[in-house]
Each structure stands twice: as structure tokens, then as C-alpha cells.
Image (cartoon, rainbow, N blue to C red):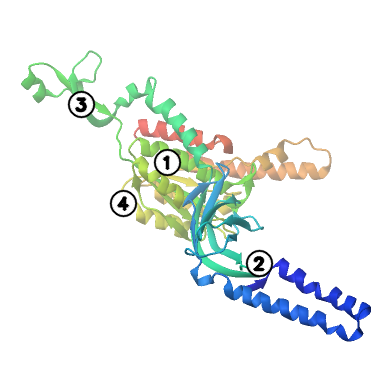
Amino acid sequence: MIAPTSRAILLACLGAPLSLILATAVARGLWPVGAVWAIAVAALVIVDAMLATSPGRMKVAIAAPAMAGIGARTVTARVTLDCGDRGPASADVALETNALIGAPLASARTALGGGQGALDVPLHLIRRGDGVIESAHCRWPGPLGLAWRQTVARINKHMAITPDIDAVEREAERLFSRTMIHGIKPLRDRGDGSEFDALAEFQPGMDRRLVEWKQSARHVKLLAKEVRAERNHQLAFAIDTGRAMCEPVAGAPRVDWSINASLMLAYVALKLGDRVSFFGFDSRPNLATGFATGTRSFTHLQAQTAKLDYSSEETNYTLSLATLAEKLQRRSMVIVFTDFTDTVSAELMVENITRLARRHMIVFVTFPDQELESLRDAKPVASDDVARAVIAHRLLQERSVVLTRLQRLGVHIVSAPVDELGRALVRAYDQLRRRERI
């Protein structure tokens, strides 16, 4: 593609005043000189474009991170240009992205030494999801500086945009270090479970049922089993991405708060040797990662959460939770992130969670409805305020009824402010794991 530069446009425009000056000062018959001037400039533009580097020789490559967290650090894409030994002195580059990534509108210029060059283009991550760098627009001038040669390189580079990964890892490391490694809890971890850990000499106060009589007879001293909490549990995070979960709470959608909390618990669970999977659903299941183990798989799970996109559809609990139940081949701890407003909308949810609770340990994560609580607790000034308070109180009562029904089914309820949700979930997991409820 060929386009005139600003220099060529300025030279072509000079033909009009030149024609006017010659026609008024020298002779009226010289007015066509301006038109000839413009045609000559146009011809020079074509010649300059033919002398410039061909678009077929310009190779464009982009290196960008496969995953990045919102607000964690500055994200840049490195653009590399290569047009061989004989090429232009400089080139302009602009990136085209999808709606999740913001790139500078103005093009950036880089020098090409020996036909090669590179530059870093800053990227602004707008929201969580699957960001795409779709193409790179590149242009360079001819040797006369009168024509631009342009090319559009299709990149289609995908970038998984996740929540603030560094903050999640820091908080998870702090919780794991404080509750799982140091202090008295590791001592309680040995002896509280049912999985065999080691043989030790029997000490007063130990459970006599753990005495290993055959080994005691062989070593001619009383030996007993040391047990620990069972490992290799399965944790399935079922995250609702439907319309209700996309409403904002404290400046972010409920889905994002859910992913933050689930990633924090997933990091701790992987550190302890458990297996973790993510399951997303709205009107139908939209994500199923399968179970991963080991801390090395944490990065893969983070990238998969970028596929949990926002949805405006109503949640289909019957289809989604039935699909999840088919995928769970052994008893697992299922952490369900969803929200509801009244008993009518929650009826199908309770019915399907009841089926899951017969075989699996269910942890139900709920978000306190601060808007209803503020309406209920607000001081009434007019009659409308009283009506709002009564309706809000009624809705909160129905919400409490649903949570009570779930508790009677053996479901563990986790309810905390959104900024404390991750820590509350880790504490609940720690308690259930030590009590061998999983």
C-alpha cells in the first residue's frame, strides 16, 4: 500500500500559490504551471514508492507474555522488524488489539540499522479475559521521503489476562507459611489423621490402638504407628459466571473476587499435595480444566481462569452441576461460587447441590449483600424508606433461609467481605482438611 508523506502533500500544495504568483506577476498564460507542478510531485511520489523497500521484504515479529496480571506491572510487547541488508532508515509501528488490551493510538518510530530494528510498545490491560494482539501496522518512507510503503502483519497473539497474580501469590505464600509450616500446627498435622506416616517408639499418652504388635515383637520394643492427615485430596472450584455474578461489589465483579479467592486456595492446596481443577458455568458449562497437581501447574491454572468470561445469561444449575458430578470420579471437595437473591431463584440451586452433597464435600461461598443491608439499616425519613427497609429485610430473611437449608444438608458455608474472602476460604479448607471432612 502506498500513501504520500506530509512532505509530498506540502510540496503539492505549493503549486497553487506558485501558479497564482506566475499568473499575476509574469503572464496569465502561466497558470497551468501549478497543475504541472502537482503532477510532477505525484510522479515523484510514485517513483519514491517504487524505490522504497517492498512490503514483502518487511518481516514483523512480536514477542509478548503469554499471561499477565492486571495492575501487577507494566506489560510491553517487543516488535522486531527485519527487511534485509538494504532497507529504510526508520519505520513506524502501531498495534491493533481487541477490547481487553489498550495499545497507544499513535505509532512509535524505531531506527533500522542494517535493515533490522526493535522497539517496546506498552500495553494497558483493561479487564480480565483472553486478550489478543490482532495485527501490527508498519510503514516506512522511501529514499526521497515523499511516499509511505505500508504493510499489515497478522499476528493473532493471545495473552491470558488474569487478576493481580503477584498479589495472589504473595498472600497465598504468607497464609501458607503462617498456618501450614511454622508453629504448632505441623505438630498437630502428625497424629490427627488416619494415613500412615512412620513407626515410632510407643510413648505414654499415645493411642493404644495404633500399637504395631508384629513390628514390636520383631524389634523387641513397643512400636506404634504415627499417622497424619490424608493427602492427595481433590478440590474442584465451580465458579458461576452468569448475570448475577457479573454485578460489581466493592469496585469489581463477583466473578473476579471469586477467581482471586480460588487462586489463593489453589496455591495452598497444590503446596500441600492436593489436586485442583476449575469448572466454569453460566447457562451451560464453559470451562473444565481437569485436575492438576504440583506447584508447577499453578501457572497453567492461572492462564485457564482467563477463559472465565463475563456473561449476561441466567445460570443453569441443573445442567452445569450435573455435568460437574459426572466429571468427579471420586469424593472431592467442591467449592461453589455463586449468588442468589431469594428462595425462588435458589430452589434449583439447592436441589442440585443436595445431589452433589450426597457424595462430595460442598463448600458454598456466598457474598454478603451490602446494598440490602444498608437499605435495611438506614434511618427512615419518608414512607418510601420504610417500604425499602421492609423489602430488604424480607429478602435478607429469605437468603438466610436458603443458607440454613444448605447447612442442614452438611454444606459448609463461607461468608466474608470480598477483601477477606480468600483468607476465610483458606481457613475453612484448613479446618475441613484436618478434620478429614474432604
Query: Nearest the camera: 158 or 40?
Result: 40
Q: Residues within 10 Å of mark 2 (few under 14, many from 20)?
A: some
The answer to which of marks 1 and 3 sits earlier in the sequence is: 3
At mark 4, the secondary structure is: loop
Q: Residues within 10 Å of mark 1 (few under 14, many from 20)?
A: many
Q: Which of labels 4 and 1 is toward the front?
A: 1
Q: Quadrant of the N terminus?
A: bottom right
Q: Is residue 310 left or right of residue 204?
A: right
- The tag on residue 145 is 2
- The tag on residue 329 is 4
Q: Residues within 10 Å of mark 4 (few under 14, many from 20)?
A: few
Q: Position of residue 104 (x, y in %)?
A: 64, 55
Q: Is residue 40 left or right of residue 18?
A: left
Q: Is residue 325 left or right of residue 97?
A: left
* Residue situated furthest right in the rendering: 24
The answer to which of marks 2 and 4 sits earlier in the sequence is: 2
Q: Are marks 2 and 3 in contact (CB under 8 Å)?
A: no
- The tag on residue 198 is 3
Q: Are marks 1 and 2 in contact (CB under 8 Å)?
A: no
Q: Residues within 10 Å of mark 3 (few under 14, many from 20)?
A: few
